[in-house]
Image (spheres, grey):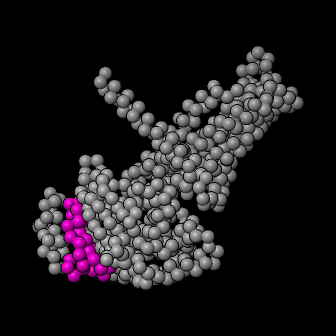
């Protein structure tokens, strides 16, 4: 019993510490966001890294997810003659849920981990100290562009995911399951509101914020050489993914 | 009256149970090159990082030009650091940037100069540290000695009043050690630059130093002119100077 109690205390202390660090980095990021100099070149570079370079993985992940949903639901819905609603299921689930979550998880794996590794390596090789010594706050120079790039690019990747997910569903339904293309197209937009699109975009903004702040935070607090960098990278991916999925539930509950 | 660049009062710093600095007191005159000697793990790097505000002491004050640096706000301290140029042990160059970009970095961040002026200053800095034709290389393509000299070039780009060197010759051969030490001496020429170098290398210290301080057991136990260091009868100084395996340093270790 005592061991369990100790474990719970240790576990909660660790996570409370992590949440504290998260909000500290978040606060500092916003504090430094509006200070000069504005390094637009660096911001642009990060946008390319987060956004443009993630296009292929997000494209493939959402295309096949849309296709799989269509495949699964088509079979199920056929049993009670509701095949005509497959398009609605695909579009609603992609726009409201799967596209932002999948894009965020893909970017976490690709970019969040890289942020932790890059900043972590800079920490253990004194490059972060060198930035301070050169009168440059590392949060201003390293974290601010990464966080804003993620906040801007995740919604764009989500829009791409929405389109490819719907396209994946259409291709499977029409060309494999022999659905009527006109009926399928009508069904895709039949129950769709602009609100559904916004929900996905708002989620993407939050997910972009979470994955970049966690990735940068883990890198920034790296200790212990190469092993420490490896540990930070793993923790960044696990923690970001968990936070994304947890916050997804609460956002779904709050948003219309 | 002597003008002090640094006034260090009762500096204490611990990491967990380990007390590293136990009341360091030091006054460093303007325009001097001071070498802080001490064995491995004695807290030299901690001391140096405290001087520029990279580490916050548990107790004590550091005055630079009469300003208590730990009373400054984050942004003020950031601005204040423009007075400093710090050279790290392995150079701490930004490995995603070329040598040119590394040296130009502080100029781009803090000076609104046209590209030509930045290029001129970068080339001038490389010339001062006796490096040529390396501006397009990445840090990973340079030797240890070259990386350190690029680090020097980056540190002097903004023409700082204070230069800090963290173990600049560790791990280098005697020839490279002399070259690095001579480079540091060259950087001191002309302007009223105050330099603090921490090292355990007596060969380098003899070239670089105007004055020598010795850090032992968390305190400065000796501070005086280079000549006085060679004549000091302080047991820890004598043991360090003569590389004697018996004495206060080894007792401290045990």
**Front in this rendered view, residue B136 or B216:** B216
Residue in the picture at 48% in, 37% down: A19
- Looking at the rendering, which quadrant does residue B54 occupy? bottom left
The picture places residue B157, in percent across and down from the top left corner, at 50, 74
Residue in the picture at 33% in, 59% down: B61
- From the viewer's perspective, is A33 left or right of A238? right
- From the viewer's perspective, is A134 left or right of A50? left
Asked if B168 appears above or below A82 in the picture, the reply is below
The picture places residue B228, in percent across and down from the top left corner, at 20, 79
**Front in this rendered view, residue B21 or B27:** B27
Most extreme residue toward the front is B1
Q: Is residue B190 magenta?
A: no
Most extreme residue toward the right is A182
Q: Which residue range is magenta in the image?
A: B200-229
Q: Is residue B249 visible?
A: yes
Asked if A213 appears above or below B110 in the picture, the reply is above
Q: Quadrant of the N terminus of chain A?
A: top left
Asked if A158 appears above or below B43 in the picture, the reply is above
**Front in this rendered view, residue A19 or B30:** B30
- Looking at the rendering, which quadrant does residue B7 occupy? bottom left
- From the viewer's perspective, is B116 left or right of B188? right
- Looking at the rendering, which quadrant does residue A195 occupy? top right
The picture places residue A215, in percent across and down from the top left corner, at 52, 46
Residue in the picture at 62% in, 73% down: B113
């Amino acid at each position: 019993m005592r061991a369990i109690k100790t474990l719970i205390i240790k576990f909660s202390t660790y996570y409370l510490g992590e949440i504290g660090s998260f909000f500290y980095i978040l606060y500092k990021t916003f504090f430094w966001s509006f200070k000069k100099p504005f390094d637009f070149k660096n911001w642009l570079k990060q946008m390319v890294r987060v956004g443009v370079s993630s296009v292929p993985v997000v494209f493939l992940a959402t295309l096949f997810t849309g296709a799989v949903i269509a495949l699964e639901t088509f079979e199920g819905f056929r049993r009670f003659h509701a095949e005509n609603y497959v398009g609605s299921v695909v579009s609603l689930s992609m726009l409201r849920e799967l596209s932002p979550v999948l894009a965020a998880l893909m970017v976490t794996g690709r970019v969040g981990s890289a942020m932790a590794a890059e900043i972590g390596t800079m920490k253990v090789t004194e490059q972060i100290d060198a930035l301070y010594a050169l009168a440059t706050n590392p949060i201003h120079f390293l974290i601010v562009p990464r966080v804003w790039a993620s906040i801007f690019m995740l919604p764009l990747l989500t829009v791409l995911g929405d389109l490819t997910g719907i396209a994946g569903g259409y291709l499977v339904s029409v060309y494999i399951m022999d659905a009527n293309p006109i009926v399928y197209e009508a069904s895709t937009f039949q129950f769709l509101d602009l609100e559904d699109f916004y929900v996905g975009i708002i989620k993407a903004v939050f997910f972009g914020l979470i994955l970049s702040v966690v990735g940068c935070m883990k890198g920034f607090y790296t200790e212990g050489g190469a092993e420490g960098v490896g540990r930070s990278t793993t923790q960044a991916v696990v923690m970001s993914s968990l936070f994304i999925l947890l916050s997804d539930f609460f956002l779904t509950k709050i948003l219309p | 009256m002597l003008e002090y660049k640094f006034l260090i009062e009762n500096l204490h710093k611990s990491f967990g149970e380990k007390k590293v600095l136990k009341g360091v007191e030091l006054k460093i005159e303007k325009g001097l090159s001071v070498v802080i000697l001490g064995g491995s793990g004695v807290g030299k790097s901690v001391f140096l990082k405290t001087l520029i505000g990279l580490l916050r002491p548990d107790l004590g004050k550091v005055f630079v030009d009469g300003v208590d640096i730990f009373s400054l706000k984050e942004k003020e301290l950031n601005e204040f650091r423009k007075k400093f140029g710090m050279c790290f042990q392995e150079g701490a160059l930004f490995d995603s940037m070329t040598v040119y970009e590394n040296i130009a970095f502080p100029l781009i961040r803090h000076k609104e100069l046209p590209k030509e002026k930045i290029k001129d200053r970068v080339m001038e800095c490389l010339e001062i540290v006796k490096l040529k034709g390396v501006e397009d290389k990445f840090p990973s393509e340079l030797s240890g000695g070259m990386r350190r000299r690029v680090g020097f070039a980056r540190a002097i780009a903004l023409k700082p009043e204070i230069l800090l060197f963290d173990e600049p010759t560790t791990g280098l051969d005697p020839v490279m050690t002399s070259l690095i030490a001579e480079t540091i001496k060259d950087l001191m020429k002309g302007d009223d630059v105050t330099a603090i170098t921490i090292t355990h290398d007596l060969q380098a210290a003899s070239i670089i130093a105007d004055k020598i301080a010795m850090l032992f057991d968390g305190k400065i136990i000796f501070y005086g002119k280079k000549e006085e260091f060679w004549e000091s009868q302080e047991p820890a100084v004598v043991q360090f100077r003569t590389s004697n395996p018996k004495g206060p340093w080894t007792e401290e270790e045990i």
